[in-house]
């Protein structure tokens, strides 16, 4: 008994569902109350939309193609894109074969009476079917039982982006189509014309991107519940850098050049040079903050534009520090034209010599007091040594080193160290610092730019 039930289980389910739904399918009417045309009634007689075609004769093959009507937005913050597509699916249903040589174009609302594949977009965050003025569906049945089912869909799909070379980056996004409930034993997907199954990208115009390449592939999605058919459409987007050159790169480079103007201003014009330095630093900070507003706040991405803005900020801040050093050297020289750094160190030496002389005098006075005290206590020491040491040959303990001697040694070493440091930092003419900066800053900036653009454009 159990063997009979197992062998005829599927047939029993088919017959049961057909009996339950036969009357309702035969009496199906449109909203206006009109009976379906005789040809459709004949096709629908005994048709069960809950059973796929070739239920007992292997999987049904579904061919797909699509047109990309538009790619509306590409978001780096959310890492997704929004596109409007026309999705077309073709399959053969042996129950819908009819005589004739013309296809039947039906109202899209009649799709509720037919079996259709349960196709879905894998990485879709949100999607909707257009319904103005009616639901944008197309149903066409051919005499050999082939069914064409077309939809107009707008979907937002996730796209993992690598922004390390932003804004000189290329992104590869995908559109994946899978069957929700039918595994590979029930349904097989294929692209109807290979890479040519996707059209519309050649005439597509995007604000910041250009479509460089696109291709299709077919694979299987493996889940805990089984293997499911999958079709993948890949397309490569290249970002247009012209906008970022005009919006970010040129202004930041001009700010660096503006910071170099202070090298040609006299070192005595303190307000002018400080104003240029501080203004360029603050402007560069504002530019850096504005460049990050349209990007995700993720620490994992050190973007190319961040590197360039960091380079520009370093040069601008370096120009401000250069004036601080040059002005410090100028203030420590009495002659504004020919400046000698040794004058300040000479004054410091005199102060150090005064401190050393004072400490030495105090040390000498302490020694004299010690000698007087030793002369008075010498007889007492001899009396104390007689009972304990008959020979009196035991050595006397050494006196501890005086704190004043230690301070004197430290000050002498400190003075020698400062003299060596002053000789190393000795600047004959502080005005030469500006002269050297006029050459080193521009040449260094050009050299770093060559390395930057070579790496991010060609490597």
Image (tube, rainbow, N blue to C red):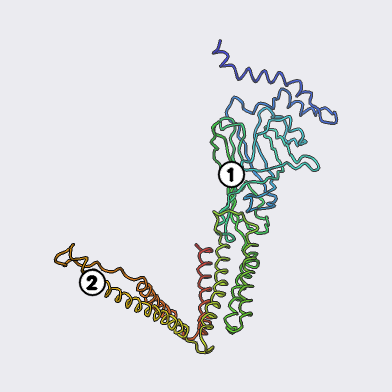
Q: Is the residue marked by circle 1 packed among few (<14), some (14-19), or many (20+) residues within 10 Å? A: some
Give the percent coordinates (x, y) of residue 114. Answer: 71, 30
Task: Name the residue rendered at 35%, 78% in the picture.
Answer: 365
Give the percent coordinates (x, y) of residue 283. Answer: 64, 69
**Quarter of image, res 154:** top right
Report the Cα–Cα distance between label 1 and label 2.
111 Å
**Quarter of image, res 42:** top right
Q: How many marks?
A: 2
**Quarter of image, res 99:** top right
Which of the marked residues, 1 or 2, is nearer the chain's N terminus?
1
Task: Name the residue rendered at 64%, 19% in the picture.
Answer: 13
Viewer-proximal residue among 56 and 272: 272
Q: Secondary structure at mark 1?
A: strand
Give the percent coordinates (x, y) of residue 298. Answer: 58, 53
Q: Secondary structure at mark 2?
A: helix
* The N terminus, quarter of image: top right
Task: Name the residue rendered at 62%, 36% in the picture.
Answer: 62
Name of the residue lying farthest toward the left = 391
Viewer-proximal residue among 264 and 343: 343
Name of the residue lying farthest toward the top = 1
Give the percent coordinates (x, y) of residue 320. Answer: 57, 74
Using residue 315 as the reference point, say whether residue 385 is left or right of it: left
Viewer-proximal residue among 85 and 372: 372
Q: What residue is shown with label 2? A: 379
**Mark number displayed over residue 139:** none
Between circles 1 and 2, the one closer to the viewer is 2
Q: Is the residue marked by circle 2 packed among few (<14), some (14-19), or many (20+) residues within 10 Å? A: few
Using residue 426 as the reference point, say whether residue 379 is left or right of it: left
Q: What residue is shown with label 1? A: 232
Q: Is residue 47 above or below residue 327?
A: above
């Amino acid at each position: 008994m159990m063997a009979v039930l197992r062998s005829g289980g599927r047939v029993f389910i088919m017959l049961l569902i057909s009996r339950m739904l036969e009357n309702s399918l035969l009496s199906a009417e449109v909203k206006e109350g009109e009976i379906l045309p005789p040809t459709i009634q004949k096709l629908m007689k005994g048709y069960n939309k809950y059973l796929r075609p070739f239920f007992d004769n292997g999987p049904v093959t579904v061919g797909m193609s699509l047109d990309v009507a538009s790619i509306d937005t590409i978001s780096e913050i959310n890492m997704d894109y929004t596109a409007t597509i026309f999705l077309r699916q073709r399959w053969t249903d042996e129950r819908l074969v009819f005589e004739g040589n013309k296809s039947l174009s039906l109202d899209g609302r009649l799709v509720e009476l037919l079996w259709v594949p349960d196709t879905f977009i894998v990485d879709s965050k949100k999607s909707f079917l257009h319904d103005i003025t009616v639901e944008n569906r197309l149903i066409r049945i051919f005499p050999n039982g082939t069914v064409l089912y077309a939809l107009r869909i707008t979907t937002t799909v996730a796209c993992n982006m690598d922004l390390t070379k932003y804004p000189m980056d290329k992104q590869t996004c995908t559109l994946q189509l899978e069957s929700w409930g039918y595994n590979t034993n029930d349904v097989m997907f294929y692209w109807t014309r290979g890479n040519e199954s996707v059209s519309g990208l050649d005439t597509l115009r995007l604000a910041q991107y250009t479509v460089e390449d696109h291709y299709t592939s077919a694979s299987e999605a493996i889940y805990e519940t089984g293997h499911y058919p999958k079709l993948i459409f890949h397309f490569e987007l290249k970002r247009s850098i012209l906008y970022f050159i005009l919006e970010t790169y040129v202004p930041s480079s001009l700010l660096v050049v503006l910071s170099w103007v202070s090298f040609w201003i006299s070192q005595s014009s303190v307000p002018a040079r400080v104003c240029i330095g501080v203004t360029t630093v603050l402007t560069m900070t504002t530019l850096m903050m504005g460049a990050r507003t349209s990007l995700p706040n993720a620490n994992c991405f050190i973007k190319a534009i961040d590197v360039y803005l960091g380079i520009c900020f370093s040069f601008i801040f370096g120009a401000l520090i250069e004036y601080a050093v040059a002005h410090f050297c100028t203030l420590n020289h009495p002659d504004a034209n020919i400046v000698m750094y040794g004058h300040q160190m000479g004054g410091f030496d005199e102060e150090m010599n005064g401190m050393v002389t004072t400490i030495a005098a105090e040390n000498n006075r302490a020694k004299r007091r010690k000698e007087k005290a030793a002369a008075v206590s010498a007889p007492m020491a001899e009396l104390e040594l007689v009972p304990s040491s008959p020979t009196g040959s035991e050595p006397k303990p050494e006196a501890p080193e005086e704190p004043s001697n230690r301070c004197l040694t430290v000050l002498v070493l400190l003075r020698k160290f400062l003299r060596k440091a002053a000789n190393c930092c000795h600047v004959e003419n502080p005005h030469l610092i500006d002269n050297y900066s006029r050459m080193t800053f521009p040449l260094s900036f050009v050299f770093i730019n060559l390395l930057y653009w070579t790496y991010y454009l060609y490597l």
